[in-house]
Image: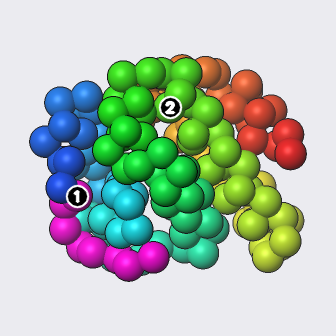
Amino acid sequence: MKIEHKRPPNYLEIIKHFPTVANKQGVIFTYGDILYAPNAHSISHDLMKHEETHQRQQEKMGKDIWWDRYFNEPEFRLSQELEAYRNQYKYTQINYGRKLRREVLKNISKDLSSSIYGNLITKVKATQLIKEQ
């Protein structure tokens, strides 16, 4: 996956749907086979697994169709993020020590339950769903 330190081609659409999140420090976007990281300088290995999941998801249906559904269908958005976070967490279970695994799980559960994705589920539910493999 190629990494570009600029905004993705659909950035204006992202701002339209997620205005408080788009410029947040560290937020990155996968668009096809490119990871756009306008405000992030380093990307952890586990986060790369998350973004590689989005790349595969977009390959299956086409990136523009995927993004359209992501913007307009909250259930779809949750399903796509849940798959990506599960893959990210699975990577931590294989490659990280216990303390770091717990920290990553805490952070990704917080993210999945936050305004980043539209407050779709609680943090407790996010933790539970991410841990289900």
Residue that sits furthest to the front in the current view: 61
Name the mark on residue 77. 2
Q: Main secondary structure of the magenta part?
A: loop
Residue 122 image offset from top left, x and y in percent:
63, 22
Name the mark on residue 67. none
Q: Is residue 51 left or right of residue 62?
A: right
When the figure is inspected, residue 25 is found, relative to residue 78, above or below; the finding is: below
Q: Quadrant of residue 90?
A: bottom right
Residue labelled with disc 1 = 8
Residue 15 image offset from top left, x and y in percent:
19, 37
State which region is magenta: 1-8
What's the residue type where badge 1 is placed?
Answer: Pro
Q: Quadrant of residue 103?
A: bottom right
Determine if the magenta segment contains residue 40. no
Q: Is residue 31 left or right of residue 61?
A: left
Instruction: Report, in whole angstroms, how far the alpha carbon at label 1 lies from the one at label 2.
Output: 18 Å
Residue 43 image offset from top left, x and y in percent:
47, 73
Query: Split into 4 quadrants, where in the image is the N terminus?
Result: bottom left
Determine if the magenta segment contains residue 5. yes
Q: Nearer the viewer, residue 54 or 29?
A: 54
Q: Is residue 73 left or right of residue 20?
A: right
What's the residue type where badge 2 is placed?
Answer: Arg
Q: Earlier in the sequence, mark 1 or mark 2?
A: 1
The residue under the point 18% across, 48% down is 11
